[in-house]
Image: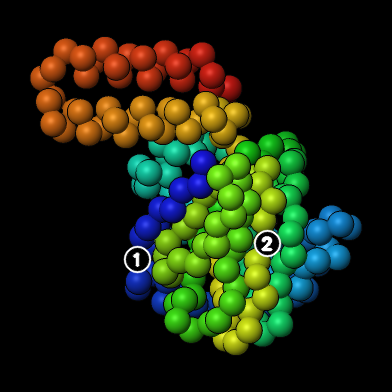
Amino acid sequence: MLLTIPGVLDGDTVGQFREALAAAEWEDGRRTTGYLAARVKRNGQLAEDHPVAQALGERILAALERNTAFISAALPHRVFPPMFNRYGPGETFGTHVDTALRQPAGQLRRMRCDLSATLFLSDPASYTGGELTIADSYGTHAVKLAPGDMVLYPASSLHRVEPVIAGVRLAAIFWVQSMVREDPARAMLYDLDSAIQHLGAAVPDHPAVVQITGVYHNLLRRWAEV
Ligand code: NI
């Protein structure tokens, strides 16, 4: 499932992010990538332990905790601390698959990356190129979103960042270990949850609303690992 979640950060917050990121020191993005992906990666990123990355990352995590669409779609168990990257003219990240397991800095336990997320920070009118191109069983999707909007997609997907031709593309990226490991099961729970929300609003007193809510929880009980 590929899902766009608008307005994860509001315009004022994105402005503050861009200001903080403009003043930070960027390093070569190949530092944190495996050998194969490093061959196709050309960008800048903030070190994981950079104070700006940590402060902004915590604000994103707080925003995600309040975001019902994210909670419903990702069913998050653990969220990797967000990382920040920057693509200038000629920079790109060629086709790759994200690493399955990651160890957040300063944590003992590794996490499994079930979902990948990109939170766009630059105005799409301010740069050309730089689309996030994601392949899934329905074809290839080119994603370029308004600042503050986020795309969530299976970490198993082949994807790339198209070369930036002009301007600068800033984004935050992170991964989610979901309580529900398999994407098709997670997608069904998301559909069921949104149907329940609509029915609950349209016919709140209908006994079937409670019955179908019970089915949702019983499927979650069957599939969730915590
Ligand atoms: Ni990637």
20 is higher (above) or lower (below) than 192: below
Nearest the camera: 28 or 35? 35
Examine the rendering and report whether any part of residue 100 can be seen: yes
Residues under labels 2 and 1: Cα distance? 26 Å
The kind of residue on which mark 2 rests is: Arg
Q: Residues within 10 Å of mark 2 (few under 14, many from 20)?
A: many
In-image side of 226 versus 197 (left or right): right
Q: Residue at x 51, y 14 (%)?
A: 222
> Could you tell me if residue 106 is visible in this image?
no
What is the crowding at mark 1: few (fewer than 14 residues within 10 Å), some, or many (at least 20)?
few
Of mark 2 and mark 1, the one earlier in the sequence is 1
Q: Compared with residue 195, is residue 47 higher up or lower down, i.e. above or below?
A: below
Residue 143, horizontal then vertical, whole percent: 52, 62
In-image side of 198 versus 94 (left or right): left
Give the structural element (helix, strand or loop) at label 1: loop
Is 225 positioned to the left or the right of 101 in the image? Answer: left
Number of callouts in the render? 2
Seen in the picture, residue 29 relative to 223 is either above or below; the reply is: below
Label disc, if present, on residue 160 of the rendered structure:
2
What residue appears at the point 57 percent right and 33 percent down from the top-left corner? 183
Q: Nearer the viewer, residue 215 or 170?
A: 215
Residue nearest the observer in this picture, 94 or 112: 94
Task: Please name the residue shown 54% across and 19% down the image.
Answer: 223
Q: Position of residue 26 (x, y in %)?
A: 69, 77
2 vs 1, front mark: 2
Label 2 residue near ligand 1, CB within 8 Å: yes
Tell me which amino acid carries mark 1: Asp
Q: Which mark is residue 10?
A: 1
Instruction: Tell me where residue 75 appears, x and y as whole percent.
Output: 48, 34
